[in-house]
Image: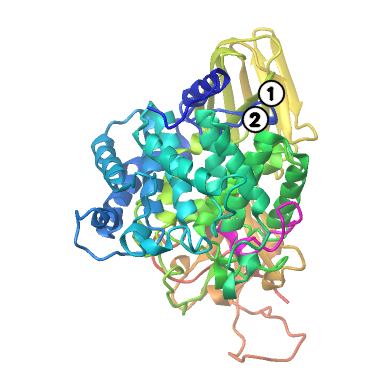
């Protein structure tokens, strides 16, 4: 069942796309790296594997329950008279259903589970009944404001919703060959092409996301029209097509053509999804001017506007990027969806061979996964942060999207199902291949099936990283002659050495200039990488005024924080002053401690300059520095990542 025909070449590419269950499968023409899917890279142990198990057992069932409870399915049912409930939620609420379907699809691909099949039958059948003969389906427009169909593209999110529908449909077909949602998504995409394709009415979405989805639909089906439509929408960005109103053109990334927009601005999630789509278009068409623009955008977002935790968005107003180095800790918006969008974009930049280099992209994804993304969900897998500040004061009041503690759901529920789909697909970001190498980007315990062009082997990675710095790799099976293993060496452990033992002898290598240590990948070989996990104190750029005079604690890729729950009565987080000369202590169980003085000066708002914050006689104590990802699991009290130092 297909919505349109494809050429024989396209059919071959479709078969290839369906064989690999990965979220992004660029053609070989312009990609430097070839991704592996969640079936080919199986996380087996450690925090990421445990997180995937929790996602499957708790987060996905919770999301399914919540989209029913919050009326997302009733919104669709009411369009066809199957519910008398009022419309609930935001006009883009359908997208949350599609993200949950996508999450379930990656879980099916990962484990082969049939647990969700009946639910998929129900919800995809519902979407099919709601879809109009033209292909259109959008519950808010159809059921509340049919007169606004494709009228207010800056606000209605019709293309954005379709984008998530497409991604869910592609994921489900790649997971197990189920194409019923794909048929529906293609009907809607074909409608979009008939209405807004090249040479027709000009229109772009106020919330980018459709671009990256259309490119993936092209990759999956071989239908050139979808790629042409995505590229056309990229070209239209910045031509003033959106009615921006008081929000302004920068909010929508409509202030300048893509090739001229060198700085990350406006609504952070929209900018990052747009960039993922632009990079996807480059990967298929090879326009070097697009990649140059993305290189500049990546530098702007990550070298001047990214939080230490791997979060983005410094302003609550407009959920937006701020100016360069505008990174307030307690007022960080740091939306979970922005980190997820950046993982998608940064992975595509790695595949494209962007200017920052594969090691930098991979280390950024590592930072995001272990910190901002991990902090967005509680230990039980059913409570979430939308906003992820790096400091919480004791008198912080709750805002709807920035509560004092994680909540089970949100009226604007974009983040929880986004977490679900990202965690289910984590294996897809671990490794890639080139013509003569297997590249290990994420240091996680896994089994990796070597692609047939490199051999017939399983490469096993054994590690407790990031709790432990020892990473072992072993080869089981046959590897083609001339293949190499490239293992990322993190920038914070530059002297680490990759060693090997095999029947033919032993070897050793340090990281090359690109950040990867390389050795021949041979049958039966065992490799070891030992990383230096000595805790370190980190200082921000001097232009980050919000944390000037402060230091943060990091160990490996993990950012730490101090939480009120670990302090004795009468000692407040906000009264701690770090004593950096005392270093960072590491207990036998891996717990970190920092020595802090407790400010005991009069409680005066302003005082004379020159006096130290803490005096020689100030009381001091050792304070636990816990992983930022784990804060708030005990109580909603004060917390901070950046600790002030004396003077």
Kindly identify the residue that appears in the image at 47 percent across and 58 percent down.
Answer: 150
Quarter holding the C terminus is: bottom right
Q: How many labels does the image show?
A: 2
What residue would you read off at disc 1? Answer: 499
Quarter holding the N terminus is: top left
Name the side, left or right, on which 1 lies relative to 290.
left
- Does the magenta run of residues contain 82? no
Nearer the observer, 171 or 530: 171
Give the dominant element type of the magenta stretch: helix, strand or loop. loop
Q: Residue 329 carries which label?
A: none
Name the side, left or right, on which 178 lies relative to 534.
left
Circle nearer the N terminus (1, 2): 1
Residue 332: quadrant of the picture? bottom right
Dot 1 crowding, Cα within 10 Å, few <14, some 14–19, many 20+: some
What residue would you read off at disc 2? Answer: 529
Task: Point out residue 40 in the picture as x, y percentages from the top left corner.
Answer: 49, 24
Give SS at disc 2: strand
Kindly identify the residue that appears in the image at 69 percent across and 23 percent down.
Answer: 499
The vertical placement of 28 against 409, above or below, is above
Task: Point out residue 524 in the picture as x, y percentages from the top left corner.
Answer: 58, 11
Give SS at disc 1: strand
Nearer the observer, 201 or 305: 201
- Is residue 406 visible to us here? no
Which residues, given as a range, are shown in magenta?
252-269
- Does the magenta run of residues contain 254? yes
Task: Point out residue 204 in the picture as x, y percentages from the top left corner.
Answer: 57, 55
The vertical placement of 9 against 275, above or below, is above
Q: Are marks 1 and 2 in contact (CB under 8 Å)?
A: yes
Residue 76: quadrant of the picture? bottom left
Dot 2 crowding, Cα within 10 Å, few <14, some 14–19, many 20+: many
Residue 29: quadrant of the picture? top right
Name the side, left or right, on which 526 lies relative to 175.
right
């Amino acid at each position: 069942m297909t919505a349109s025909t494809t050429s024989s070449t396209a059919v071959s590419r479709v078969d290839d796309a369906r064989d690999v269950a990965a979220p992004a499968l660029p053609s070989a023409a312009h990609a430097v790296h070839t991704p592996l899917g969640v079936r080919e890279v199986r996380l087996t142990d450690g925090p990421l594997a445990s997180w995937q198990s929790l996602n499957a057992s708790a987060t996905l069932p919770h999301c399914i329950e919540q989209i029913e409870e919050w009326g997302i399915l009733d919104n669709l049912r009411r369009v066809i008279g199957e519910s008398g409930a009022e419309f609930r939620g935001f006009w883009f609420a359908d997208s949350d259903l599609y993200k949950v379907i996508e999450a379930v699809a990656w879980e099916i691909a990962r484990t082969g589970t049939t647990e969700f099949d009946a639910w998929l039958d129900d919800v995809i059948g519902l979407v099919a009944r709601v879809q109009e003969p033209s292909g259109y389906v959008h519950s808010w427009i159809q059921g509340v404001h049919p007169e606004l169909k494709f009228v207010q593209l800056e606000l209605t999110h019709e293309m954005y919703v379709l984008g998530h529908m497409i991604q869910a449909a592609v994921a489900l077909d790649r997971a197990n060959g189920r194409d019923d949602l794909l048929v529906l998504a293609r009907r809607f995409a074909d409608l979009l092409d008939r209405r807004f394709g090249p040479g027709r009415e000009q229109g772009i979405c106020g919330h980018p996301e459709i671009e990256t989805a259309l490119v993936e639909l092209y990759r999956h089906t071989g239908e050139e029209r979808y790629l042409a439509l995505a590229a056309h929408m990229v070209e239209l960005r910045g031509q003033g097509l959106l009615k921006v109103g008081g929000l302004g053109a920068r909010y929508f990334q409509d202030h300048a053509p893509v090739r001229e927009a060198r700085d990350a601005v406006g609504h952070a999630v929209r900018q990052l999804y747009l960039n993922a789509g632009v990079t996807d278009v480059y990967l298929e068409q090879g326009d070097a001017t697009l990649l140059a623009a993305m290189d500049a955008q990546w530098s702007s977002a990550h070298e001047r506007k990214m939080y230490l935790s791997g979060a983005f968005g410094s302003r609550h107003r407009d959920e937006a990027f701020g100016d360069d180095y505008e990174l307030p800790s307690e007022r960080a918006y740091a939306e979970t969806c922005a980190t997820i969008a950046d993982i998608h974009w940064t992975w595509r930049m790695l595949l494209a061979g962007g200017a920052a280099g594969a090691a930098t992209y991979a280390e950024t994804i590592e930072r995001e996964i272990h910190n901002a993304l991990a902090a967005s969900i509680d230990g039980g897998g059913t409570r979430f942060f939308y906003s992820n500040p790096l400091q919480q004061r004791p008198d912080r009041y709750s805002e709807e999207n920035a509560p004092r503690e994680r909540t089970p759901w949100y009226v604007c529920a974009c983040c929880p199902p986004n977490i679900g789909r990202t965690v289910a697909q984590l294996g897809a970001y671990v490794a890639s291949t080139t013509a003569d190498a297997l590249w290990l980007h994420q240091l996680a315990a896994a089994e990796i099936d070597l692609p047939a062009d490199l051999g017939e082997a399983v490469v096993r990675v054994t590690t407790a990283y990031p709790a432990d710095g020892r990473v072992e790799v072993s080869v089981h099976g046959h590897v083609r002659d001339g293949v190499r293993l490239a293992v990322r060496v993190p920038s914070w452990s530059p002297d680490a050495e990759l060693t090997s033992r095999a029947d033919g002898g032993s070897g050793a290598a340090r990281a090359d200039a690109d950040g990867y240590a390389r050795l021949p990948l041979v049958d039966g070989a065992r490799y070891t990488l030992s990383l230096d996990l000595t805790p370190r104190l980190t200082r921000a750029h001097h232009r980050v005024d919000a944390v000037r005079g402060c230091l943060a604690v990091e160990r490996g890729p993990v950012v730490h924080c101090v939480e009120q729950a670990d302090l004795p009565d009468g000692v407040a987080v906000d009264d701690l002053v770090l004593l950096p000369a005392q270093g960072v202590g590491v207990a036998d169980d891996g717990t970190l401690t920092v020595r802090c003085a407790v400010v005991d000066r009069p409680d005066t708002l302003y005082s004379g300059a020159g006096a130290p914050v803490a005096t020689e006689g100030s009381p001091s104590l050792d304070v636990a520095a816990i992983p930022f990802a784990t804060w708030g699991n005990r109580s909603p009290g004060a917390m901070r990542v950046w600790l002030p130092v004396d003077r």
